[in-house]
């Protein structure tokens, strides 16, 4: 037993020290800094809305997609990821099903459907769609809700983010924020 302890003591002590350093101290330090520097993002960018009666409600994260299927809402990218090849028969079938579904909820719209409305993002939880995808849906939303197209467009514009520093990334429309604004929550 003495020989066992002599040989494995450094291993056990190293394990405990590294667990304390990496699993407790480092994690606590990073979490603490995040809470001080950017608390909203550190807490998941939860959208909290104060209602007219003074109560508050949480409606989800502005960074994780929510699924909307009602025609009165802006519809986001399909959720879930896929390992299917972009040229596979299975992917083609999924895209065709999504096209047919979008055409069924807006049969008067004969415009080309933007690609991001029929294909999932790499993460499968992208909360943004392209401004073109939002514009494609604006007339349907206005018609179903009985409001002006200009009003819908103002809301879409308000929740459209620009490219980072004007050059990196893509413009995007936050689907959850637009839908909450359409419902008068934001």
Image: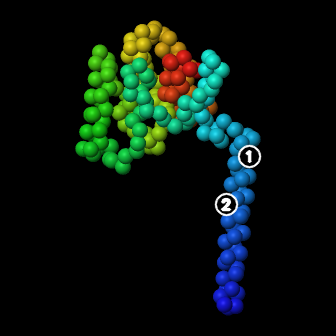
**116 or 175, which is in the foreground?**
175
Quarter of the image for residue 160 reads top right
Look at mark 1 in the image and give the residue it sits on: 33
| Percent position of residue 172, x then y | 51, 29
**154 or 185, which is in the foreground?**
185
Look at mark 2 in the image and give the residue it sits on: 23
Where residue 45 is drawn, which disc sits there?
none
Q: Residue at x 40, y 44 (%)?
A: 81
Q: Residue at x 63, y 18 (%)?
A: 53
Q: CA distance from mark 1 to mark 2?
A: 16 Å
The C terminus - image quarter:
top right
Residues tagged 1 and 2 counted as in contact (Cβ below 8 A): no
At mark 2, the secondary structure is helix
Nearer to us of marks 1 and 2 is 2
**118 or 45, which is in the foreground?**
45
Q: Is residue 28 left or right of residue 100?
A: right
Label 1: few (<14), some or many (≥20) within 10 Å?
A: few
In the rendered structure, which disc, 1 or 2, sits on the residue that comes first in sequence? 2
| Percent position of residue 184, x then y | 54, 17
């Amino acid at each position: 037993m003495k020989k066992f302890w002599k040989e494995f003591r450094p291993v056990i002590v190293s394990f405990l020290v590294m667990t304390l350093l990496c699993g407790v101290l480092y994690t606590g330090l990073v979490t603490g800094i995040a809470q001080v520097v950017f608390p909203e993002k550190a807490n998941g960018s939860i959208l909290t809305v104060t209602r007219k009666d003074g109560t508050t409600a949480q409606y989800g994260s502005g960074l994780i997609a929510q699924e909307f299927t009602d025609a009165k809402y802006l519809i986001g990218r399909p959720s879930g990821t896929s390992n299917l090849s972009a040229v596979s028969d299975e992917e083609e079938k999924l895209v065709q099903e999504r096209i047919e579904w979008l055409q069924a909820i807006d049969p008067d719209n004969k415009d080309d459907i933007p690609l991001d409305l029929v294909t999932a993002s790499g993460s499968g939880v992208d909360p943004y769609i392209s401004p073109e995808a939002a514009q494609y849906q604006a007339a349907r939303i206005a018609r179903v809700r009985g409001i002006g197209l200009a009003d819908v467009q103002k809301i879409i514009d308000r929740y459209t983010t620009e490219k980072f520093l004007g050059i990196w990334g893509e413009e995007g429309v936050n689907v959850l924020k637009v839908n909450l604004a359409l419902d008068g929550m934001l």
